[in-house]
């Protein structure tokens, strides 16, 4: 429901007129923006995502920070996973060696 | 738009590359292939063997494997025999006693073979590493301390590093 405006305000709004001159084709520009926004809202997710990141990546500081963060994440994960995998391989090699030289360990593991 | 996508993809590739380099550097040359390759590769690294020492140890290992395989078959056969005898009766028979004695003799024979092999391998290593190998392998195979020590005993760290 539309709220009732006080009579005084209604009168002022009717008398009000724009004192500055609008730029040429102002209305067209406004409508173009409205259409563009509507198109973006209906666009596929990928397009909307790119539209979202584009202004971010235009800032060199953000782009550099993004690259540095991924570099750091990749390096740290690689170092950690590599060390864990290396330890696991060492343990496997050790266990396999013992099974190969000790027939009782082989018999035991076979029984299991 | 193209520039943004390029930076996005470049970042992902950079992250993947940064992961792959240390990961593969740490896990390369870890003895790809069969179980024997893993085991011997571990032995080579753990006891810091050079090419000549490793060659000699690998030969000893291969020779011992033939004997070890035969011993495994005899142990398995004796275990099966004993198992059948145990389940076929409800008391300790003279036959069970006999097979248990044979089993104990077999274990002794096996351990003597193992010990002889361990001495040979340790002599093919540098003196210090040979002693370390002998200490480690005896503790893990010849029931040295296995009755008392937990398998994950921290003592192992002192020997291995």
Image: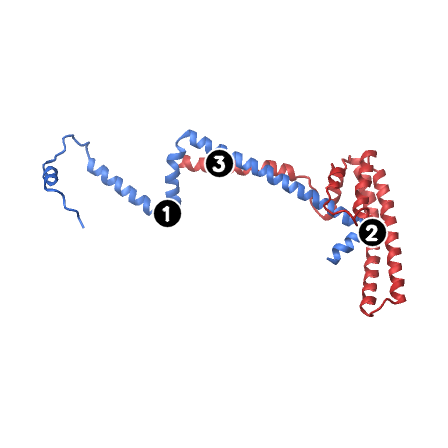
User: Which color was chain B given?
Assistant: red
Q: Chain of mark 3?
A: B
Q: Are marks 2 and 1 on the same chain?
A: no
Q: Is residue B76 left or right of residue A3?
A: right
Q: Chain of mark 1?
A: A
The x and y percentages for residue A15 are: 9, 36
Q: Mark 3 or mark 2, which is nearer the start of the sequence?
A: 3
* The N terminus of chain B - image quarter: top left
Mark 3 lies on a secondary structure that is helix
| Residue reaching furthest to the bottom | B89
- Residue with the mark numbered 2: B68
Q: Residue at x 40, y 36 (%)?
A: B2
Q: Residues within 10 Å of mark 2 (few under 14, many from 20)?
A: many
Q: Are marks 2 and 3 on the same chain?
A: yes
| Residue reaching furthest to the front | B148
Q: Residue at x 86, y 46 (%)?
A: B115
The chain assigned the colour blue in the figure is: A
Mark 2 lies on a secondary structure that is helix
The x and y percentages for residue A30 are: 23, 38
The x and y percentages for residue A10 are: 11, 41
The correct choice, above or below, for B44 with respect to B77 in the image is: above
Q: Chain of mark 2?
A: B
- Residue with the mark numbered 3: B11
Name the image quarter holding residue A26: top left
Q: Are marks 1 and 3 on the same chain?
A: no
Mark 1 lies on a secondary structure that is loop
Check if mark 2's residue and mark 1's residue have beta carbons within 8 Å: no
**Label number found at residue A44:** 1
The x and y percentages for residue B57 are: 81, 41
């Amino acid at each position: 429901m539309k709220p009732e405006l006080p009579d005084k305000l209604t009168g002022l709004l009717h008398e009000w007129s724009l004192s500055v001159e609008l730029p040429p084709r102002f209305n067209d520009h406004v409508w173009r923006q409205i259409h563009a926004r509507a198109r973006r809202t209906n666009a596929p997710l990928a397009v909307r995502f790119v539209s979202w990141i584009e202004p971010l990546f235009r800032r060199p500081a953000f782009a550099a920070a993004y690259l540095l963060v991924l570099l750091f994440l990749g390096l740290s994960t690689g170092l950690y996973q590599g060390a864990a995998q290396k330890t696991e391989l060492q343990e496997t090699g050790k266990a396999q060696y013992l099974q190969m030289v000790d027939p009782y360990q082989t018999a035991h593991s076979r029984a299991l | 738009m193209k520039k943004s996508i390029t930076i996005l993809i470049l970042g992902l590739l950079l992250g993947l590359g940064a992961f792959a380099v240390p990961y593969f550097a740490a896990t390369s040359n870890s003895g790809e292939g069969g179980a024997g390759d893993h085991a011997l590769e571990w032995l080579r690294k753990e006891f810091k063997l050079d090419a000549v020492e490793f060659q000699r140890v690998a030969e000893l290992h291969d020779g011992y494997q033939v004997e070890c395989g035969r011993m495994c078959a005899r142990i398995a056969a004796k275990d099966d025999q004993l198992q059948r005898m145990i389940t076929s009766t409800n008391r300790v028979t003279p036959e069970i006693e006999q097979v248990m004695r044979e089993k104990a003799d077999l274990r002794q024979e096996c351990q003597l073979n193992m010990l002889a092999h361990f001495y040979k391998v340790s002599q093919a290593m540098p003196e210090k590493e040979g002693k370390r190998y002998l200490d480690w392998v005896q503790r893990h195979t010849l029931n040295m301390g296995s009755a008392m020590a937990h398998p994950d005993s921290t003592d192992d760290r002192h020997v291995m590093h």
